[in-house]
Image (cartoon, grey):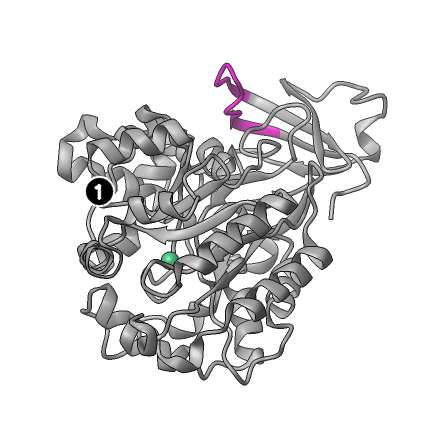
């Protein structure tokens, strides 16, 4: 994936580095080689960058633009892009929404999974996202035995950096779970396919295009034994672990009834409370649970649109971050958002927390931290999330002359306060993988 030629982005009006000093550079340039940033500077690019004249580089003119580190999406279900705004659940909460959609998802074909991944990733790229995960836990009986490979190949065809998860569901209604029988698999099948996918795709090296994580779906769709065996497999291979947790009050009641404890106690009992785990939603934690999560360094994928859409509740992100948990932002699946616009999610996060706690309850800078460095920490990607030498050259470029930003004073705040516009360009590993003017001229 990385651009083997040098890459030079120049003339950026404002460059938000998110480096250790949180430098914001005006009239900036960024140089990269082999997909990694080599230098960042102010003013005209020097005659020699990294020992070579910039004329030899692939160049991008970011005149009039704000450049952010590529945004990181920490939770998604790409397949749901085929079932947006599904009739019958437009006004439903999580459990009825799931019960209606499971049978619909069970009929998706390989072609639909492929198309959903392409559409979801292109939409993410268009909103400045350069790294996404995909919580893929749905393996219909009629699907290819290599379904996850189909999804991974589709995502990579868009140029995005991709962290697929081999998700799973093993507990159906027959065993007291929520999903129907025809969408669950047994533990041996799940773990064998996990091993296969990891062997084929997982790349632990810095700058990797693909890293695999393991992701049993939720306390109400898997059994504790699968959780334990999955953690053991993940730790043997140095993989991260992901699941849904504490999304709704229904889930609390389910855990009390089935396991006799709260969701976080369940997580701890199966050996999952650790720094190699990040959780989707994490809404219904009490003070003691937030302290435990912080001590463990367990991450949270905050999904404000989905939480509002399903009426699930509001994640206590500031408390979680203060306690020591990495918090990232996420669009969640496209059947509960129903969009993969990550820039829009930054705006939702900013506004949601202000509803609850006043204008000081969430700042533009905190949201930017979550969308970049916080997300990178959740995914274990400390080679992304900032524009600094040695980090991946993943950039989100926004045009301040786009109609939605015209007249804005603070160019960085504009990206969150104004209605989100498509990126001018999105760059992954020093390659332009989304170019608005080439692909989407009407958005200019
Ligand atoms: Zn989800």
Residue 213 in the image, given as x and y percentages of width and height? 56, 51
Seen in the picture, residue 294 relative to 258 is either above or below; the reply is: above
Seen in the picture, residue 202 relative to 68 is either above or below; the reply is: below
Question: Does any portion of residue 442 appear in the rendered image?
Answer: no
Residue 218 in the image, given as x and y percentages of width and height? 36, 59
Q: Is residue 18 magenta?
A: yes
Residue at horizontal 33 percent and vertical 79 percent from the top: 174
Residue at horizontal 31 percent and vertical 24 percent from the top: 322
Q: Which residue is mark 1?
A: 352
Seen in the picture, residue 221 relative to 214 is either above or below; the reply is: below
Residue 66 in the image, given as x and y percentages of width and height? 49, 33
Residue 284 in the image, given as x and y percentages of width and height? 22, 45
Question: Does any portion of residue 129 appear in the rendered image?
Answer: yes
Residue at horizontal 50 percent and vertical 57 percent from the top: 134
Residue nearest the observer in this picture, 361 or 314? 314
- Give the quadrant of residue 154: bottom right
Image: magenta residue range: 11-26
Residue nearest the observer in this picture, 262 or 101? 262
58 to the left or right of 105: right
């Amino acid at each position: 994936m990385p651009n083997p030629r040098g890459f030079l982005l120049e003339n950026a009006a404002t460059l938000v580095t998110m480096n250790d000093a949180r430098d914001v550079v005006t009239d900036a340039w960024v140089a990269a080689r082999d997909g990694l940033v080599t230098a960042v500077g102010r003013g005209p690019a020097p005659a020699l960058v990294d020992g070579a004249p910039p004329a030899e580089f692939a160049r991008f003119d970011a005149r009039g633009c704000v450049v952010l580190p590529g945004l990181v999406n920490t939770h998604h279900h790409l397949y749901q892009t085929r079932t947006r705004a599904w009739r019958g659940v437009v006004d439903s909460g999580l459990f009825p929404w799931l019960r209606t959609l499971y049978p619909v998802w069970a009929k998706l074909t390989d072609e639909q999974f492929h198309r959903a991944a392409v559409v979801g990733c292109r939409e993410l790229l268009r909103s400045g996202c350069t790294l996404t995960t995909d919580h893929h836990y749905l393996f219909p009986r009629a699907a290819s035995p290599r379904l996850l490979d189909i999804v991974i190949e589709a995502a990579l065809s868009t140029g995005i950096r991709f962290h697929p998860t081999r998700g799973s569901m093993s507990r159906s209604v027959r065993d007291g779970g929520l999903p129907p029988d025809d969408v669950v698999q047994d533990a041996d099948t799940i773990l064998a396919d996990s091993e296969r996918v990891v062997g084929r795709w997982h790349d632990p090296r810095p700058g990797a295009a693909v890293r695999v994580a393991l992701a049993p779906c939720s306390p109400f769709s898997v059994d504790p034994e699968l959780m334990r065996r999955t953690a053991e497999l993940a730790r043997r291979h140095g993989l991260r672990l992901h699941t849904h947790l504490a999304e709704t009050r229904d889930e609390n009641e389910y855990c009390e009834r089935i396991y006799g404890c709260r969701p976080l106690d369940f997580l701890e009992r199966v050996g999952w409370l650790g720094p190699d785990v990040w959780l989707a939603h994490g809404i219904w934690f009490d003070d003691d649970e937030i302290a435990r999560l912080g001590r463990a360094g367990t991450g949270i994928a905050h999904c404000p649109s989905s939480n509002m859409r399903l009426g699930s509740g509001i994640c206590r992100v500031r408390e979680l971050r203060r306690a020591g948990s990495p918090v990232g932002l996420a669009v969640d699946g496209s059947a509960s958002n129903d969009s993969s616009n990550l820039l829009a999610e930054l705006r939702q996060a900013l506004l949601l927390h202000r509803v609850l706690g006043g204008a000081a309850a969430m700042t533009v800078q905190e949201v930017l931290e979550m969308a970049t460095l916080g997300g990178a920490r959740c995914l274990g990607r400390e080679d992304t999330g900032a524009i600094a030498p040695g980090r991946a050259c993943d950039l989100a470029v926004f045009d301040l002359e786009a109609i939605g930003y015209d007249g804005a004073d603070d160019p960085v705040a504009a990206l969150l306060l104004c209605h989100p516009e498509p990126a001018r360009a999105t760059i992954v590993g020093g390659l332009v993988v989304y170019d608005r003017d080439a692909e989407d001229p009407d958005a200019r």
